[in-house]
Structure formats: C-alpha cells, structure tokens
Amino acid sequence: MCKPASFLLLGLAVVTALPQSPILRKLGSGLRYEYAQDDTGRLHLVDLWGTLNDLMEVVRYNPDTQNVYHLFTRNNPTTSQPIVLGNLQTLWSSNYNPAHRTVILLHGWGNTVLSASNAVMVPAFLAKEDANVIVVDWSAGSGTINYLAAVRNTVTSGQAVARFVNWLDSVNPVQTSYHIAGFSLGGQQSGVIGRNLARSPAYITSLDPAGPGWVTNEHKFRPTDGEYTEIIHTNVQSAGYLQPLGDVDFYPNGGNNMPGCSTGGCDHDRAYFYFAESLQTGGFTGRRCENYEAALIGDCNLPETLQLGGLEPKTGKTGIYYLQTSSAPPFSLG
C-alpha cells in the first residue's frame, strides 16, 4: 500500500528539482503575474516574464500561412469569401472592389473571425457604406492560453497583415482608402500593421487596446502609425491601456466602469459597441481635457469638442477627450 505513494512522492521531488525554463525577457516593469482578460471576458493570471518555453511556442506560429482573410461586402454580408495572400484567383473571383473603402478588422486574445467584436462591427460598416470589410482571423496566434506568446504573436501577425495589404495594393490599379480597426490585442496589432505598410493608412481605430504586457513594449501603438489614429479607452483599470496612445484618445465615462456594466469584460466590450454606433449616428460628442488624468475624473472644461469614431478620419485633430454615455443602446447622449 505504501509503495505507490512513495513512488509518487519521489516523482514529485524529481519534477520540482528540474530547472525552470530560462527567463529571456521581462515584459513590463511591474509585477511578474497580472490578470489579463481574453475576448470572451474571462480573466486569466498571466506571466509577463518571457521564458524559453514561450519562445518555442511563438516560433510554431506562421502568420503568413495561418492567418485567414475573410471578405464581407454588401453582396455577401453574412458569408465570407476567403482571400489568400498571393493567390489572385481568390481575389478576382471575390466581391472585392478596390474603388471602395477597405476596412481591416482584428479580434483579440482567444478569439476568431466569429468574435463578438466582428459580429457587431461588420454589419455596422456595411450598413453605412458598401465597403470591403476584411476580417483577419489570426486565431492560430491568439488562441493560445499563453498570454505572453499571444502578445508576441500580435506583433508577427501585424507584420504579416501588412504584407497582405501591401500585396492588395500591388495587384490593384486603383488605390483604396484603408481603415484599420482592432479590439484589445487587435487594437495593439492595428498599429503594427499601420507602421509596416508601404502606404500609410488613412485611419486607424484602436478599441480599448490591451494593457498587460504593453506598457514597456517597444511595439505598442504609436500616434504616427496612420494618417489619423484614434483610441477609445473603456477598461483602463484592467484589460485596457491606461495612457494616451493616438492622435486622439477618448475616455468615455473616465475610461472605466461603463454605465450598464457590472464586469470588466462588459467595460472592455463597450469600446466596439460605441464605435459601431458612431458609424450609424455620428453621436458621442467629447469635450477636450488638459491631460488624461483629468479625463479619468471627468474634469474637462476646455472649449473644443470632437465626435468619437465615425466613418471619416479627423485628420489633423489631436487631444484627449471625455464624454458620458447612457447605460443601454443608444449609448450616445449627443
């Protein structure tokens, strides 16, 4: 009766004596372990110190072959047409029209082309305009439970998406206008795409871009990633990034605790709900703040106002803006 137990204890001792995977990089200056939220609203305790095991997982992801690009237009609003990088047949046989605006949508950690953010934004864009809406399924890189690997894959996926967009440009005689919109990790990825394009995109919208693993990350979003860059912060105390990142940064309700929400996941998701509604109504008037600290407490009394989101870029505009929303659709108070 004792022998199996003794063998088990010996086995445990051997396992604990094995060397841990070597630390390669500390992704952040704070605590090693933080909670991060995936696209489905679940919280995970994640390790922000990169190890050799993390690197081994990252190298298994090849975004040039594993990313899938799903085209939606008004002619196929609910069933996508996959376009394959380098395969002209998939492009020419699709409903892609280079004379129309091209929208690139990016989901976040642990999700796919069927993410809630895409389910909200695809119909919102198509209801407003007959655009080429291309949803990037990078779930081969984002689907890992290893958050640090997903952060690294965010960068390599963004570089691959840029190669895909550059290919689109190279094979079309008409240059389309690009609008890149990403949620959470996709919000950070949208900047990586923009800075790697041969032609700077007209408009990038980063929807509550991920915070954990990005504060000291050299690849985080930059205001220069597009001709006009806009950030919508809705969960700055957990999943989202706290400080300004774009030409214009909106902090609805102070960037946290959205009316009608009782969880951080709900707060996080509000970013794409607000943006989708802005496409339809043009609502959400923000008032300019002196700094982001003032936006967090709603102490913003500068005279300038600006509309959140919308279809057209507000090129040349800069600043930090605060606004309030209602607790249920329509969320805009004007």
Image (cartoon, rainbow, N blue to C red):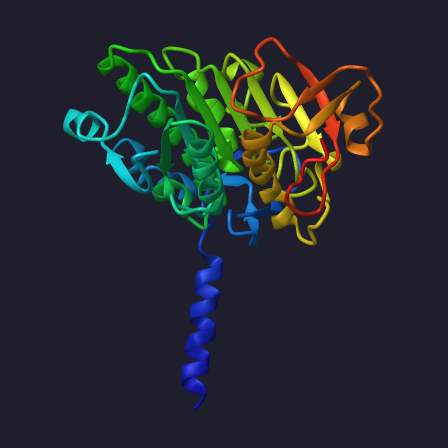
Residue 279 x, y percent position in the rendering: 54, 30
Q: Residue furthest left?
A: 89
Residue at 84%, 21% in the rendered image: 301
Q: Nearer the viewer, residue 15 or 327?
A: 327
Q: How many marks?
A: 0
The C terminus sits in image quarter = top right
Residue 188 x, y percent position in the rendering: 51, 30
Residue at 85%, 27% in the rendered image: 299
Q: Nearer the viewer, residue 156 or 222?
A: 222
The N terminus sits in image quarter = bottom left
Residue 214 in sight:
no
Asked if 5 appears above or below 96 in the picture, the reply is below
Location of residue 285 (image quadrant): top right
Residue 10 x, y percent position in the rendering: 45, 71
Residue 27 x, y percent position in the rendering: 56, 34
Q: Nearer the viewer, residue 14 or 198?
A: 198
Residue 25 in sight:
yes
Location of residue 293 (image quadrant): top right
Horizontal side, residue 251 vs residue 32: left or right: right
Residue at 48%, 58% in the rendered image: 17
Q: Nearer the viewer, residue 166 or 121?
A: 121
Asked if 253 appears above or below 248 in the picture, the reply is below
